Amino acid sequence: MAEMSYRTALVTGASSGLGRGLALWLAKRGLRVFAAGRRLPQLQALAAEAQAAGATVEPLELDVTRTEAHLERLRELDSECGGLDLVVANAGVGGVTHGKRLDWDKVRAIIDTNVTGAAATLTAVLPRMVERRRGHVVGISSLAAHRGLAGHAAYSASKAFLATFMESLRVDLSSTGVRVTCIYPGFVKSEMTADNHFPMPFLMETDAAVELMGTAILRGETELSFPWQLALPSRLAKVLPNPLFDAAARRLR
């Protein structure tokens, strides 16, 4: 695929964690970055940090779960900025959804953000990208997408949806000039993982994860999984017979 020159980017979930780090990383490389999230003060602090580094980050207060308003705002933004070159669907939430104590409100909250919100983000200006024959959509999935993690049915399933969604888009858009990238992070230090009360092997620093992600995006790679020490067994787990996987998952739990 030919090299692409990026001018503008949208990153959702940019008020903290990987989204914040990626927005700043892209801005420092000359992109005009729209950092979207629900917490405006954090986004404004990010914009100030970017400005101090000679970069441009513009805060965008946005709730991906308000689907119609979200779609409308992204289309307006696409028109206002002369076309978004890069859209990163990063906003996501986690939480325990154990089968023995399943709570619909928790399940729905995860689906609303990780499934509906992500799909809306990726879909909003994709038809325009196809018309322009340029653009790049990125979905931040998870290594948890490969098998259902014990106690995290909704989260694993939501990330599996996003991974499959991105794969179909990649096939469909192969001759359009629009790039598709799916990223599968492992455990990364963030607000989300700070609340985890279970072992997190090969936990990565945010900056190291962002460097891997940003580099892969600008290279136009179709997939990125990290860290390799966790990515490899996660992928191998896909082919384990169910009795073996179930036994292993119970021990890890």
Image (spheres, helix red, strand yellow):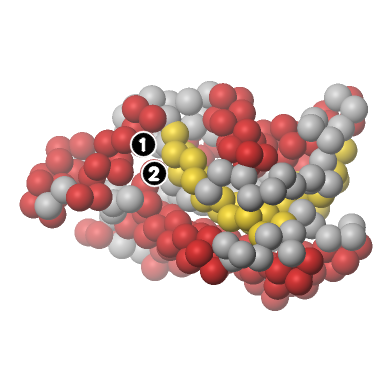
Q: Earlier in the sequence, mark 1 or mark 2?
A: 2
Q: Position of residue 15 (x, y in %)?
A: 69, 42
Q: Nearer the viewer, residue 129 or 77?
A: 129
Q: Helix or strand or loop: what does disc 1 sit on?
A: helix
The quadrant holding residue 153 is bottom left
- Seen as rendered, the residue at the extreme left is 243
Q: Is residue 13 visible?
A: yes
Q: Amino acid at mark 2?
A: Leu
Q: Amino acid at mark 1?
A: Ala
Reading the image, the residue beneath label 2 is 143
Reading the image, the residue beneath label 1 is 231
Q: Position of residue 132 (x, y in %)?
A: 78, 66
Q: Which mark is residue 245?
A: none
The quadrant holding residue 121 is bottom right
Q: Nearer the viewer, residue 208 or 167?
A: 167
* 163 vs 14: above or below: below
